[in-house]
Amino acid sequence: MKIALLGYGKMGKTIERLALEKGHSVVFKSSIDSSEGNFEDAEVAIEFSSPEAAVKNISKALEARIPVVSGTTGWLEKYDEMVKLCEKRNGSFISASNFSIGVNLFFSINEYAAKLMAPWKEYNVSVEEIHHLEKKDAPSGTAITIAEGILKHSNKKNWKLNTSEENSLNIIAKREEDVKGTHLVSYDSEIDTISFVHEAHSREGFAKGAILAAEWLKDKKGIFTMKDVLRIDEF
Ligand SMILES: NC(=O)C1=CN([C@@H]2O[C@H](COP(=O)(O)OP(=O)(O)OC[C@H]3O[C@@H](n4cnc5c(N)ncnc54)[C@H](OP(=O)(O)O)[C@@H]3O)[C@@H](O)[C@H]2O)C=CC1
Ligand SMILES: O=C(O)C1=N[C@H](C(=O)O)C[C@H](O)C1
């Protein structure tokens, strides 16, 4: 598979290493001010850049009719715009807040737990995420997906960052040196706490999942999610 890497930072470089090990080739890569290779040669684009660059990068791939896998977080207010463009160009598009298999299983565990806990009003649910100091967005895209999963089954109205409002689901975002990505869901009562956590040990899980998504998407048309790739049923 011939890959274009749109964004060649921590994730772009990890994806390149693992993709080459799998026998794929990288025909194009771009950063803020530089690019190398020939974009038109790519069979699929994998986009991990920044909230400011994501829409431009995804549009560039869709306009060129190159299937695009996007992992960038913090730009999702423009998601519907990208879906429309994908439909207009009869293209192929997957965006996910987290491509790791473990986190996608965690999303389902989280929804199951939310449904189970819904009648037990003595428990207050909260979400905590911890990431490295360079992360630009807060809360993390993964924490937002987790919160949306909880809100499907809860009587809380919305999620908010660092809130004590009873009607809002509190997301706590912490930044610490070199943390790859930790997400914790807690149900607290006066009597006890139930919590479950996903901790990424490296960026390899995100990168492997993005390559898997690219292999899966390459010859398909439409807009998909990681649940389609991993064949995980919706709750
Ligand atoms: N969905 C998932 O599974 C995961 C998502 N992410 C998300 O992916 C994104 C990238 O993460 P990461 O690789 O760690 O970040 P880095 O900061 O290490 O890399 C970002 C890359 O994007 C480039 N870039 C930044 N701004 C622009 C711009 N305006 N135009 C063109 N290129 C730009 C940077 O260029 P330069 O090198 O010149 O600075 C760099 O190459 C983040 O949004 C993060 O939250 C991260 C891990 C997993
Ligand atoms: O910026 C990161 O590093 C990560 N970002 C994603 C997010 O915002 O959820 C996924 C992962 O947690 C790493």
Image (spheres, rainbow, N blue to C red):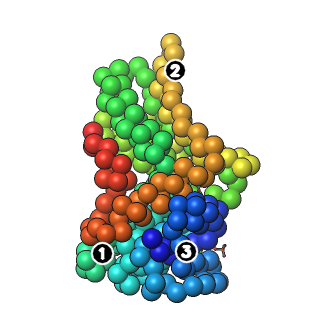
Q: Is residue 110 visible?
A: yes
Q: What percent of the width, then of the height, locates residue 145?
A: 42, 48
Mark 3 vs 2, N-terminal side? 3
Nearer-the-camera pick, 9 or 215: 215
Q: What percent of the width, then of the height, locates residue 177?
A: 74, 49
Residue visible at 40% across and 63% down in the picture: 215
**Quadrant of the image for the N terminus?**
bottom left
Q: What percent of the width, then of the height, locates residue 57?
A: 48, 77
Give amino acid for label 1: Gly
Give amino acid for label 2: Thr
Which element is circle 2 on? strand
> Based on the displayed image, in which of its 4 quarters is residue 182 positioned?
top right
Q: Is residue 102 above or below residue 213?
A: above
Residue bearing mark 1: 91
Residue visible at 54% across and 57% down in the picture: 207
Asked if the residue at tag 2 contacts the one at tag 1, i.e. Cβ–Cβ closer than 8 Å, the answer is no
Mark 1 vs 3, N-terminal side? 3
From mark 3 to mark 2, how far is it between C-alphas? 47 Å
Q: What percent of the width, then of the height, locates residue 112?
A: 34, 31
Q: Is residue 169 left or right of residue 36?
A: left
Residue bearing mark 2: 193
The 10 Å Cα crowd at callout 2, few under 14, some 14 to 19, many 20 or more, is few
**Of marks 1 and 3, the one in the foreground:** 3
Residue visible at 62% across and 79% down in the picture: 32
Which element is circle 1 on? loop
